[in-house]
Amino acid sequence: MDFGVLVMKGYSVPAVLWSMLLAMPLVAHATRFTLPSERPIVVRADSVANDPEQNITRLHGHFSIEGSDWPMQADDAAVYGPLENPTRVLVTGKPARIWVKNNGIERDVMAEADEIEYTRGLEVLRLRGNARLVQGGRRSLAGEYFEYDLKSEKVSQGGPVRISILPSKPKSDDAEADASALPEQQSR
């Protein structure tokens, strides 16, 4: 910084220095806030093995990934492609878990199973073994195996399945009408 130019414009050197010193905490404070796309991706595991020829990274023991639109926790993982932008992730655990940003909502979809395969380009989750999926905190699906398309929100299943949907809250006027109608319906 050329202090001579600032002094020539009528600013004193001490005033410029004080201004800079006062602004430093503001700049330091602002750097702590980052946009979600600027968050670092943090991968943890007890051990890692990389196969550059196959472009696969295998992570074993207490695997987790954070800072992405699809945080995961599992016992083991196989990541196909670069860690920051894989094409496919296969995780296993008791249970393995993934939370996925859907329709712009962070962690809108939560899935857990013994094995989860997430194909990112297709936005498809495949759950195998003790599979459970919760969407929006209201709808849940449980079974041994199913596939969930995040784009179309379609489910295809391969065995017995249990679906649970929480009722939406009635409006206060509707709730009063329903409550007053209940005794009449029961007395008939």
Image: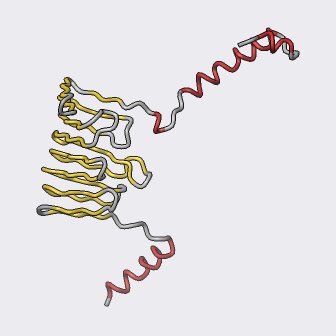
Q: Position of residue 125 (x, y in %)?
A: 24, 51
| Total tally of numbered discs in the picture | 0
Q: Residue furthest bottom?
A: 188
Residue visible at 37% across and 32% down?
41
Seen in the picture, residue 171 relative to 57 is either above or below; the reply is below
Whether residue 61 can be seen here: no
Picture quadrant where residue 166 is located? bottom left
Seen in the picture, residue 180 relative to 63 is either above or below; the reply is below
Picture quadrant where residue 98 is located? top left
Q: Residue furthest right?
A: 10
Residue visible at 31% across and 90% down?
188
Q: Nearer the viewer, residue 183 or 10?
A: 10
Side of 159 relative to 168 (left or right): left
Q: Position of residue 80 (x, y in %)?
A: 23, 38
Picture quadrant where residue 27 is located? top right
Residue visible at 18% across and 30% down?
53
Q: Position of residue 144 (x, y in %)?
A: 13, 55
Residue visible at 44% across and 52% down?
104
Whether residue 101 can be seen here: yes
Q: Residue furthest front?
A: 53
Seen in the picture, residue 66 relative to 125 is either above or below; the reply is above
Rendering colour mode? secondary structure
Question: Which quadrant holds the N terminus?
Answer: top right
Side of 170 relative to 94 (left or right): right
Q: Position of residue 88 (x, y in %)?
A: 24, 43
Seen in the picture, residue 132 relative to 75 is either above or below; the reply is below
Side of 105 relative to 133 (left or right): right
